[in-house]
Amino acid sequence: MKNIPFSPPDITQKEIDAVVSVLESGWITTGPKTKLFESQIAEFCNTEKSVCLSSQTACAEMTLRILGIGEGDEVIVPAYTYTATASIVRHIGAKPVIIDCGKDSFEMDYDKMEAAINERTKAIIPVDLAGIMCDYDRIYAAVENKKHLFSPSNEIQSIFGRVIVICDAAHALGAERGGKMCGEVADFSNFSFHAVKNLTTGEGGAVTWKNHKGIDNEQIYRQYMLYSLHGQTKDTYAKNLGTSWEYDVVDTQYKCNMPDILAALGLAQLSRYKETLNRRHELIKRYDKAFADLPVSVLDHASDNHRSSGHLYFVRFDGKDENYRNAFFKRMAQNGVICNVHFKPLPMLTAYKQLGYDINDYPNAYNMYKNELTLPLNTTLSDDDVRYILDTFRRCIAQPY
């Protein structure tokens, strides 16, 4: 029997050498490697700038704060996502407005999303779940249709003049749709480099944003720097250059910068990322072919108009329920294949139930969750591992429950 973990990091000697080089350099916190990583992420995403911070969550929360969203405001989020999408809205004192999935879809019901936009709505946070980009044409159409309701409370919101689209792209680095990369479509896009992500820095994240008339990209970049380093006007690296030690603290802000140790790991990962993406899509094709004759539904990871980042491989058991899915999960684990479930919809979690959200109000999200299983999909899998996963899956689905 094989033992196949769900999502181990794909670390090669290249990553090890890069980190060792930084450790030996005498400079391990935020410095030249982080700045280089930022420039390469921006280039990869076809944007002018990017900022690398300690997590996707930090990137997304700092984005909301830079946009001046807070008390009395509403931010629309999907029911089918991880808590980080909505918890940041609570952190800034705004209200998460949670939208059910569309029927037989993991994405928001876009009609309900549009209907929820009102004078208090400041942002929408769509989630590129499993690395598949959302329908941003529909999202932007909705915010334009409701533009007359938008009530800006500061200068930057006035410049946008509409609800701002902030993508939770935690899964989606390298995804494409309509000829554009994830990172250049939403107004702001926040990526995760957590240990289980396609590209990892152990912990970490990045934010990109597209050019917008009236927005000074350098000024936005400087604001992220201030928000991530206590509001201090000069970081340690700049002071270490010897031009001047003098600095100021212009606001009482946060501490969520990315150090060079992590950026070095990210640079090594990014240098072979196209190869990584291609391997993931090879695995997806093998899964799709193997499951074509089984009573399961899978996601569409590639077409003429889109290509996902291949982050997660979802399987839904047609006509089955939670009990069946959970039993199947255990059966796979007993055979050495560790799977996962993505995700419990937010209204099923204690924190959101205590806020008054009820899963009974989100029937489509529950129906997507109840029979969903996520299979191992990572670039440490050998061809033999994949054969074992597929053979095990077939044996398990053929057994009575």
Image (cartoon, grey):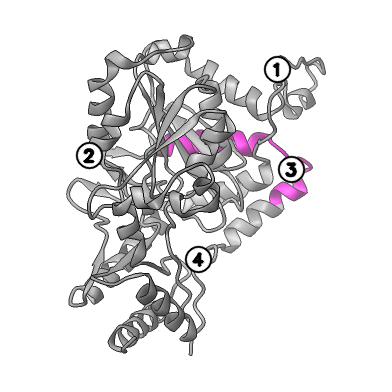
Q: Mark 3 points at which residue?
A: 28
Counting residues from the start of the chain, the first of labels 3 and 1 encountered is 3
In the displayed structure, does residue 57 sit left or right of residue 172?
Answer: right
Counting residues from the start of the chain, the first of labels 4 and 2 encountered is 4
Q: Mark 1 points at which residue?
A: 251
Q: Residue 127: x and y, percent?
A: 38, 43
Q: Are marks 3 and 2 in contact (CB under 8 Å)?
A: no
Secondary structure under the numbered disc 4 in the rendered image: loop
Q: Check disc 2 and give the amino acid type.
A: Gly
Q: Do the residues labelled 4 and 1 touch (CB within 8 Å)?
A: no
Residue 215 in view: no
Taking depth in this image into account, of 308 and 154 the one nearest to the observer is 154
Taking depth in this image into account, of 305 and 261 the one nearest to the observer is 305
Q: Check disc 4 and give the amino acid type.
A: Ser
Q: Distance between the residues labelled 1 and 2?
A: 41 Å
Identify the magenta region: 21-44
Q: Mark 2 points at which residue?
A: 178
**The magenta stretch spans residue 112:** no
Q: Mark 4 points at which residue?
A: 7
**The magenta stretch spans residue 33:** yes
Identify the residue at horizontal 58%, vertical 25% (top origin): 224
Q: Closer to the camera: disc 3 or disc 1? A: 1
Q: Check disc 3 and give the amino acid type.
A: Ile
Taking depth in this image into account, of 243 and 142 the one nearest to the observer is 142
